[in-house]
Amino acid sequence: VLIDVHCHLHEFSNPHKFKEIVIIAVSDDLKSSIKTIKLCETEKNWIPAIGIHPWEVKNTRKSALEEIKHLVARHEIKVLGEIGLDKKFVPETWDKQLIFFKFFLKLANEYNLILNLHSAGAWQEVFNLLVKYDIEKALFHWYTGPLDLLEKIESKGYFIGINPAITIQEKHKEVAKISKNFITESDGPYKYRGLELNPLMIKNTIKIIAELRNESVSKVEKRIEVNFRKYFEF
Ligand SMILES: [Zn+2]
């Protein structure tokens, strides 16, 4: 079974073509959080993650945070995402991003939630806050941060996402060669340098990871499955 640990399923016009794939469906804002919860009720393989994406922080009222909290309580949500910090694409909203992210870290502690994280240009800052807030379960989606930080992330028992962009992104290849705690993801339907990312690409992603690591496809699949079980605790 294919595992997609980070996908914006609510943005696809025909998401049900991915119904065989185990997907953590992340949200971007309050509206897509509600949509994602409803969407995931229709397929047994899909798990909703809710939250406010760092790119959406600029256009989101702080009162939306309380509404996310209500959704968590009302729908027995297990995962928060896509949340985090971004210094690369939206540095101008950094202070407000910090307020939002710290709210979600407290919420995670209160409800024992699993985090699905965006950390572009802020890998170290996100890691430091996870440690500070004593977060147990977290995944750094599409990890392209420093390799020495990857070691620290994994020694804390956190996970990273490996994306189909691995076909063209050299930094991601280096990550895939040495990571232990990786899980496959698509980040679909995001477009990256001509790649229209979607969950069906994960089959080929696994093949490339296996080649890079000199391991069999079945060994890589097994590791992804074991990691996913540890991350999601099912
Ligand atoms: Zn994403």
Image (cartoon, grey):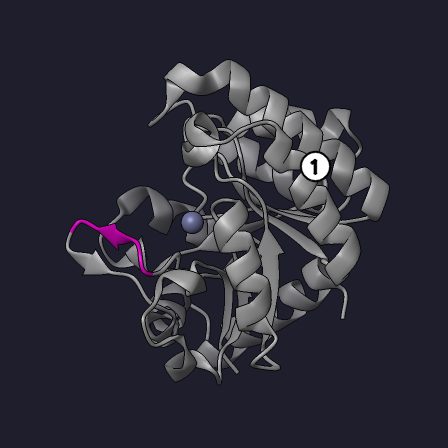
The magenta span reads 189-193
Q: Is residue 67 magenta?
A: no
Q: Where is residue 88 drawn, in percent x and y?
A: 36, 25
Left or right for 58, reference 95: left
Residue reaching furthest to the left:
194
Q: How many marks?
A: 1
Residue reaching furthest to the right:
110
User: Image quadrant for the C terminus?
Assistant: bottom right
Residue at left offset 70%, top offset 68%: 229
The residue singled out by tag 1 in the image is 66
Residue at left offset 54%, top offset 46%: 30
Judge whether residue 6 can be spotted in this image.
yes
Main secondary structure type of the part rendered in magenta: loop
Q: Is 21 located above or below residue 85 in the figure?
A: below
Query: SS of the residue at dot 1?
Result: helix
Residue at left offset 56%, top offset 57%: 34
**Residue 97 vs residue 157, the one in the foreground:** 97
Left or right for 193, reference 101: left
**Residue 45 vs residue 60, the one in the foreground:** 60
Kind of residue at badge 1? Glu
Q: Is 37 located above or below residue 175 in the figure?
A: below
Q: Is 48 located above or below residue 147 in the figure?
A: below
Residue at left offset 48%, top offset 30%: 57
The quarter holding residue 14 reads: bottom left
Q: Where is residue 69 drawn, in percent x and y?
A: 72, 43
